[in-house]
Amino acid sequence: MAQQTINIGTVANDGTGDPLRTAFDKVNDNFNELYSDDAGDVNSVNGNTGVVVLDADDINETASRSYNQVHTGEVIGGTSLTIASNVVDADNLAVTGNGTSGQALVSDGDGTFSWTDLSSGISVSVLENNTTAVAGYLYVLTADLTLTLPSSPTVGDYVKISNRSGVDTCSVARNGELIMGAANDLTLNYLNSGFEMIYSGTSQGWILIGVEGAAL
């Protein structure tokens, strides 16, 4: 029913307005429609900040204005749209770009994500000059040089080393971290030695794996 407006005339008591009975009949009709609308619509309002449930009785639905629809485009305009915490899961997460074949979506640890290449094997670098290592690499030393360990390592970071230099004076610089619990650089005084170094934390630093230990 369309809203019924009471005709109040042009001036007071000019006799052109609705009779009293007609006026209150319109009032009753308007209130009856309001109260006969879905009761849940009113009950779902909690003070001034609650959720208002709108249905077909409340919205004049058109092609460009419809109810109970999913928004699929960008949200634009001067007002920010805030999404409550813990309501978006992996199924709702939209990421810019599609990445390329062989890439995976990886957390950057700060709430953002990046498309990252998945390694199909260990990265290898053959060295002839002094170099600062990158975690996850195998370094093949072919000259008398210094390999500096990565700065600010994370527990679990690793570097693999193979000494093919033909000399016993190559060194591994600790770069501010401990090596086997000691604040000393490592000299590679065994020819053709190969081993792995894994960062274990500040207490012991870089731990050597694959190196024969000494008897007590």
Image (tube, helix red, strand yellow):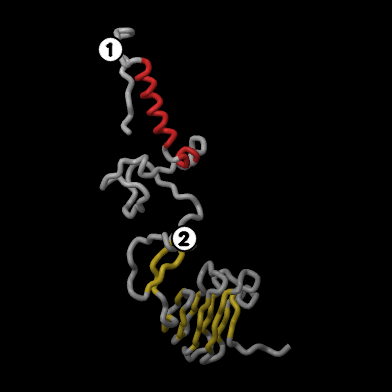
Q: Is residue 87 visible?
A: yes
Specify the amino acid type for callout 2.
Asp
Judging depth in this view, the residue of 49 and 25 nearest the camera is: 25
Which mark is drawn over residue 86? none
Residue 89: which numbered mark, if any? 2
Q: Quadrant of residue 94?
A: bottom left
Left or right of 52 in this view: 211: right
Image spot of residue 116 (x, y percent): 40, 70
**Sooner in the amino-acid sequence: mark 2 or mark 1:** 1
Count of numbered tags: 2
Q: Position of residue 149 (x, y in %)?
A: 52, 74
Q: CA distance from mark 2 to mark 1?
A: 63 Å
Determine whether 101 is above or below 61 in the image.
below
Kindly state the secondary structure of the residue where label 2 is placed: loop
Q: Is the residue under label 1 in contact with that under label 2 (CB below 8 Å)?
A: no
The location of residue 166, given as percent across then percent down, is 48, 91
Q: Nearer the viewer, residue 77 or 164?
A: 77
**Residue at left offset 35%, top offset 19%:** 22
Question: Is the residue 166 above or below the residue 138 in the image?
Answer: below
| Quadrant containing the C terminus in the rendered view | bottom right
Classify mark 2: residues with Cα within 10 Å, few (<14), some (14-19) or many (20+): few
Residue sitting nearer the eye, 179 or 37: 37
- Check disc 1 and report the residue beneath it: 16
The residue furthest right is 216
Above or below residue 154? Residue 119 is: below
